[in-house]
Image: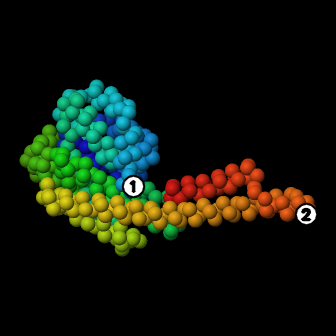
Amino acid sequence: MLVTGPGRSGTSALTGMLSMLGVHVPGPLVGANSTNERGFYETRWVVDFQRKLLERAYTYEFDGDPRAELRVAKVLADGEAAGKLDAWFAPAAGQHSLVAVKDPRSIWFHDLWTTTAGKHGYQVKYLTTLRHPAEVVGSRTTYYSTETRELQAREYAVAKVAGWVHVSLLNERETREQPRSFVLYDDLISAWRPVAAKIETELGLAFPARPDPWDARHPVDDFISPQLHRVTTTWDDLDCPESLQVIADEVWEACLRIAVHGRDADAEAAFDELSERYSRLYRDSAAIVADMASSRVDRARAKTARKVRAELAAQRPPSTLTRLTEPLPAPVRRRVRRVGRRVIDRLVRR
């Protein structure tokens, strides 16, 4: 089972439950920390492996760029990643009938996992936790963001809403023809037994360490509780552009339909239409940013050129000042170009 869904959606709680129900989660695991004191239940090798692949693709877990999948595909094209995953998979293959791998990055590598698992006799099934985008972004802002200035904090939040939309669309599209189960985070932490039963039914499996009977006391009772719901951000708490918020809400509603009905033709058609709308919104926004970046680069280069001319003027005798209207020397022109590149780099990082 690949546990997917945007980070901070409850994937750790879900995978912890799976582990306590007898599903093997390969170790060593990522250690708990202040952002997740009960543990991430993430396999360290998988996290490091997939993070490096995304870095090579100039992509990240919450990437909002619809073109990011193409960059990832190029990184996988040479087969090196497939060889590494196969080498990790092979030694333990067949030792456990049910295995869960949790890393939000996995959805970027769905074909890689499906092919490799199939070689070793496993069928990949997908488990996705659903949490409202405002809460996901609020949780990421609370635990991950280092921005303290209002403008930068808003830009962080808007980018994460876009990332939530894109990753949710990607996740649905790539799991559509696969065995999958969508579960609500609120349902999981309020009453985990019905969620576990839903997963068994939808994925066609039985948990080895399930309660018998279902209402018997179980270790999961001490692990999952409504107290896990610590962040309750709403749209009122986020200054999100209306056009993006509308798409996010519609993606959320389509996800809910999948969670309730399973395969749903109307929901799948809605996802396809939302993918087109989001891609168009992203392209339009990128065009505006490109214009802004070009203007900033021009202004920065002009400012640097004026500064350099002033420095040269201060170093030359008065009789040579008229020569300052001549083109700048090549080393100075390179300095001006470097300033422009730094401006672009700052814009891209933001």
Instruction: Please give the residue where the numbered disc 1 appears in the rendered image.
Output: 65
| Foreground pick, 79 / 132 | 79
Residue 44 location in percent, x, y? 37, 38
Mark 2–mark 1 distance (CA, rounded to whole Å): 54 Å
Tell me what residue is drawn at x 85 percent, y 63 percent.
322
Q: Amino acid at mark 2?
A: Pro
Tell me what residue is drawn at x 63 percent, y 65 percent.
299
Whether 120 is drawn above or below 251: the answer is above
Tell me what residue is drawn at x 13 percent, y 52 percent.
198
Left or right: 218 with respect to 242?
left
Q: Amino acid at mark 1?
A: Asp
Q: Residues within 10 Å of mark 1 (few under 14, many from 20)?
A: some
Whether 149 is drawn above or below 38: the answer is below
The reply to whether discs 2 and 1 touch (Cβ–Cβ < 8 Å) is: no
User: Secondary structure beneath disc 1?
Assistant: loop
Per the rendering, the mark at residue 318 is 2
